[in-house]
Amino acid sequence: MRTDENDFLQRLRATFTLEAQEHLHAVVTGLLELEKAPEPGAQRRIVEMIFRAAHNLKGAARAVDLTQIEARCQSLEDTFSAWKRQQALPSPAALEAAHRTLDAISAAVPRAEQSRGPHVPSAPPREPVHPEVVTEALPQTTAAPEKPFTGEETVRVAIPKLFARLAEAEEMLAAKLALDRHAEELRELRRKFEIWGKDCSAVEPDARALRQALGRPSPAGGPAFHVHAARVVEFLERNVQHLKSFQARVGGLTMATSLDRQQVGKLVDDLLDGAKELLLMPFGTLTAPFPKLVRDLCRDLNKSADFVIRGEEVQIDKRILEEMKDPLVHLLRNAVDHGLEMPQQRLESGKPARGTISVAASQANATTVEIVISDDGAGIDFEKVKASAVEHGVVSADDALGLGDTKATALIFESEVSTSPIITEVSGRGLGLAIVRERAENLGGAVAVESHPREGTRFSIVLPSTLATFRGIVVEAAERQFIVPTLHVQRVARLDPDDIRTVEGRDTISLSGRAVALVRLADALGLPLPEDDDAAGPAKLIVVLGTGDGRIAFAVDAVLDEQEVLVKHFRRPLSRVRNIAAATVLGSGEVVPILQVSDLLKSARKVGTPAIRRTAAAPPPDAARTSILVAEDSITSRTLIKGILESAGYVVRTAVDGMEALALLRAEHFDLLVSDVEMPRLNGFDLAAAVRDEKKLAELPVVLVTALESPDDRARGIDVGADAYIVKSSFDQSNLLDAVRRLV
């Protein structure tokens, strides 16, 4: 077959993948409905529907030369045809055989990149214990994620193109914020003109009186005095006229800018909202394979459950749905395996033999959604959780004895902690819940769990409904600004120094009758306090982060604003920076870090001494006279490294690539060079080699900061003469500062 024919066939098969997922889902849904033994009329309609779906899938497979799928579809079609003619009945054995055939078809469907839709999971056959599937949502036709059917005309667009348009729309947010800033500056200028005008108006009577006095003959001062005084009066009168003219023009410009800001702001908001909506998809596109998943798990574990889905119409960003698919599957597996008891156990405890598992999505507010996975099983066995945590060294045996159920609940999110006595294909590895929490937090969300013995367990996951932008609070600490996601902020309040108490060597305050640890944000971030900071007097504002007993109050110098934030993710080598999730650009053009709240809470717990009363750390000796050049082509990474070094007291210059850095090194004096490796024009390896080749620069210390961590890359760094090679797979500012202090 020629190349062009191969390409055409691949495009056809990509389209077939989308169509096949729709037909497969229709057949799976119909089979699950038939398992509930519907009344004869409904059964006939369902059989007719799945017969047509199987027939259409067979024809589509034949068109793209997928003979294996075509043959299996023919087998299904023969079975469904017999059911239609009532020559056979959809018995449990026949339904199970149909499910196995569907599993085989699903496994054979090509996995095209542009068609990552619901996948029907397969499982080995056993005697079925069938769950009832109840869907409580607005009526809708479920379809593959790439093509949700809404009754309107649609067109398929490649996802990367949608991402590109969304990114362009998001960049307009920076223009909107800048315009807001300019409008505020003009309002401030107008206020100053108003004050100036009032001052001038106040002296106008004096100027008139002086002119009248100058018109009368008087020996005082002589002719020269009269001339000079007359000039001053004329200047004052002209000044008042100019001031009124400027004031009027600034006032008009301020009003016009405010109107422009409102219009542009609305256009930007509408554009961004519209672009986001292109990537919003119904929650039901994610839950489509869940009924069969629960059915197969119940069959494998000889359990029985009703499965309830609510909120399928709730709209969520496609990227969030993709990221949360595996965590939700894990929670469903846990609900069946760990949560539900065996039917006989349920009957003995006074429960129905069939359990209930539910998945529900709801719009928590304008910017967040809540996904709840619950079961009515036995609940979490906290004694087993604590025993597993002790076994794996998460807590000591003594500490475990003092843990209540609330604190023990947090242990289930620790890696390797599991209540399963054996590792199976379903569970037992103790990694799933840690991944659930990590995935949710990486998306800017949070996970909470509530469990009661013999009543069941409820997992609540709160997530942003869209990525890229969110509401954030701008705070100031150690003369630097940071963004805290509003989603994680429990409370913002003024701090009364008299409310601070020391409990077990830590500063605490009382909130709602409970002691909450108090830590200065600058200390948690490892930032030295300014020299003029009053170490004995705490900051006057606190921002409370975390939930339940895990809350921590962070003392900050100021809470400046709450605004919409455009996320700028780091790229290599700063793909993982402790305490920092990403960065954003304010309307002033300043690059500000976005705090990673989960990391921040961990860092705060490591602050061992009373944080508020601790004195500022002294900068290294002669740090203010040490000059460092930072070569980095990423503006975000460059700004972050510059900020780390300046916070330690060093004088820092920056270069956007190796070529500019080499020119600066030749023209000016520097005590140390910090360089990225992957840069345009002249990379870090070649820059270090060029430095060593020049007599003037041969002794200059060179620190390479890179994500290249292979032994060959490290060896090359040594060969070109680098004095330190820092791998940034898990960036920690202390590593950089330690290297710098050793070399200068």
Image (tube, grey):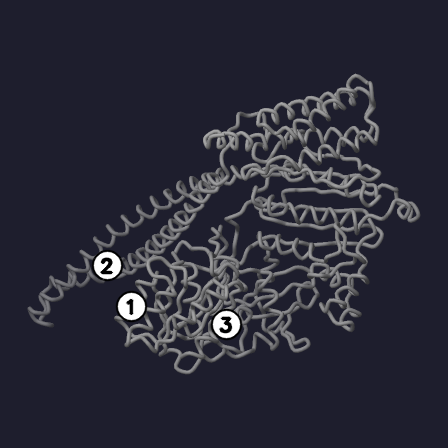
State how far apart marks 1 and 2 are (Cα).
Answer: 57 Å
Q: In this rendering, does residue 646 appear at all? A: no
x 70%, y 35%: residue: 104
Of the image marks 1 and 2, the number of the one nearer the N terminus: 2
| Three-letter amino acid code of the residue under disc 2 | Glu
Q: How many marks?
A: 3
**Residue 247: x %, y % from top left:** 28, 52
The residue to which callout 1 is attached is 664
Q: Residue furthest left?
A: 223
Observer-nearest of 579 and 64: 64
The 10 Å Cα crowd at callout 2, few under 14, some 14 to 19, many 20 or more, is: some
Of the image marks 1 and 3, the number of the one nearer the N terminus: 1
Q: Residue furthest right?
A: 348
Marks 3 and 2 in Cβ contact (< 8 Å):
no
Mark 1 falls on what kind of element? helix
The 10 Å Cα crowd at callout 1, few under 14, some 14 to 19, many 20 or more, is: some
Kindly indicate the quadrant of the structure image that contains residue 552.
bottom right
Depicted 269 relative to depicted 642: above or below: above
